[in-house]
Every structure is written in C-alpha cells, then in structure tokens.
Image (spheres, rainbow, N blue to C red):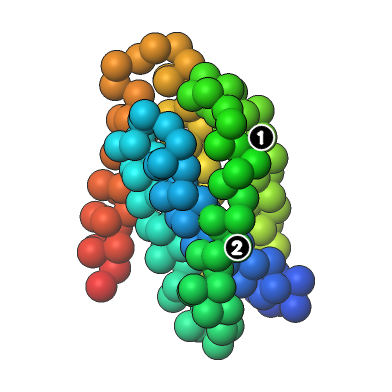
Amino acid sequence: MAQKMRVTDKYLKTLLSYYEEEIEGEAYFYGLVDHFEEQDELKMLARVERRAAESVIPLLEKYKLVPRDESELKTRGESHVQRHAAFDWIEFMTYIVNRYPGYLEEFTALERMAPEEDQYALNSLTEHEVAAIEFANRELAGDPDSLAPLCDYLKKVVICMHNTI
C-alpha cells in the first residue's frame, strides 16, 4: 500500500508562487507584443501562461490559498518586459531555449513534493513549459508549424479540463 504524502508548507508556498508567476508571465508576454513583429506568437504564449495558471486553480481552492490581486501580478509581469524588449526575435527564442529548462526543473520539483492526487493539475503546469521550449526550438529551426506545440497544449488542457467538470 502506497504511503500518502504529507502536504508541506513549502509545497503550498511554492504552488501559490508558481500560480502567481504564471499570471505575471501572461502579462509579460502581452507586454512584449509592442516590441516584436511576432505578435500572434506572443499572444499565444500569453494564453498558454493563463491556461497553465488556470490548471492549478482547483489546487489553490483545495488548500485555501489566496493569491495576490491579479492587477498587482500583472504589474509585476509587465515590469520584466524591458529586460527583453531590446532582443531581436532569434535572441528571444534563444533565451527561452536556454532559460526555460530551469523552470521545467522547478515544476518537476514541485511535482515531487505533491501528493498523488495533485499530480494531474501539476503535470499540466509542467507541460506548458515543455510546449514553450518546443515552440522556441521550432522557431529557431525555421519550422513553419512552430506554433503546433502551443496549440496542442491549449487543446489538450481545454479537453482535459472539460472532461473533469
């Protein structure tokens, strides 16, 4: 018989933090729209961030976690725009390919802290990072279907969320 994992304060704080960071990420990508020609791609990345955040809302509710006000989170996300606004698109995609695997490691570490019943929602959080990295790799390779991983993620999450309702 499998032993039930105890929910720790570290897990709960990390879960809440990662939710808030996804809301910030949405604002960040929307904020970059004015700095790149690839506006549709950035809007898609923003939607992926929002969907990732939405995937863990049931966990926030389950543990009675209350995030900061969304307007504050959006302001925080927008504050990071200038850091990458001077990049050209290839530099930005290279940044994603090099930096986002670190986020992927953080999300998988969160999964290891979580009780089994939380894994499904957390996997959706982790998978959004996989989709973003795959998108950036495809952009760098000149793949005309580079948005496919993001579209697939959005479709999968919508279908899965619908099936759990």
Question: Please, what is the three-letter code of the amino acid marked with disc 1?
Answer: Arg
x and y percent of residue 146 in the render? 35, 24
Instruction: Label 1: state its secondary structure.
Output: helix
Q: Mark on residue 99? A: 1
Q: Does the image show residue 150?
A: no
The residue drawn where x is 53% and y is 23% is: 88
Q: Taking 142 as reference, is 150 above or below it?
A: below
Residue 165 horizontal side relative to residue 96, left or right: left
Q: Does the image show residue 28?
A: yes
Q: Mark on residue 76? A: 2
Q: Label 1: how many residues lie within 10 Å, few (<14), some (14-19) or many (20+)?
A: few
Q: Are marks 2 and 1 in contact (CB under 8 Å)?
A: no
x and y percent of residue 10 in the render? 76, 71
| Residue sticking out furthest to the bottom | 64
Residue 108 horizontal side relative to residue 58, left or right: right
* Real-space CA distance between mark 2 and mark 1, rounded to the nearest whole angstrom: 19 Å
Q: Mark on residue 33? A: none
The residue drawn where x is 24% and y is 63% is: 163
Instruction: Label 2: state its secondary structure.
Output: helix
Q: Earlier in the sequence, mark 2 or mark 1?
A: 2
Q: Nearer the viewer, residue 158 or 146?
A: 146
Q: Taking 58 as reference, is 18 above or below it?
A: above
Question: Please, what is the three-letter code of the amino acid marked with disc 2?
Answer: Arg
x and y percent of residue 22 in the render? 52, 58
Q: Taking 134 as reference, is 77 above or below it?
A: below
x and y percent of residue 31 in the render? 46, 49
Quadrant of the frame with the C terminus:
bottom left
The residue drawn where x is 44% and y is 75% is: 58
Q: Label 2: how many residues lie within 10 Å, few (<14), some (14-19) or many (20+)?
A: some
Residue 64, by quadrant, is: bottom right
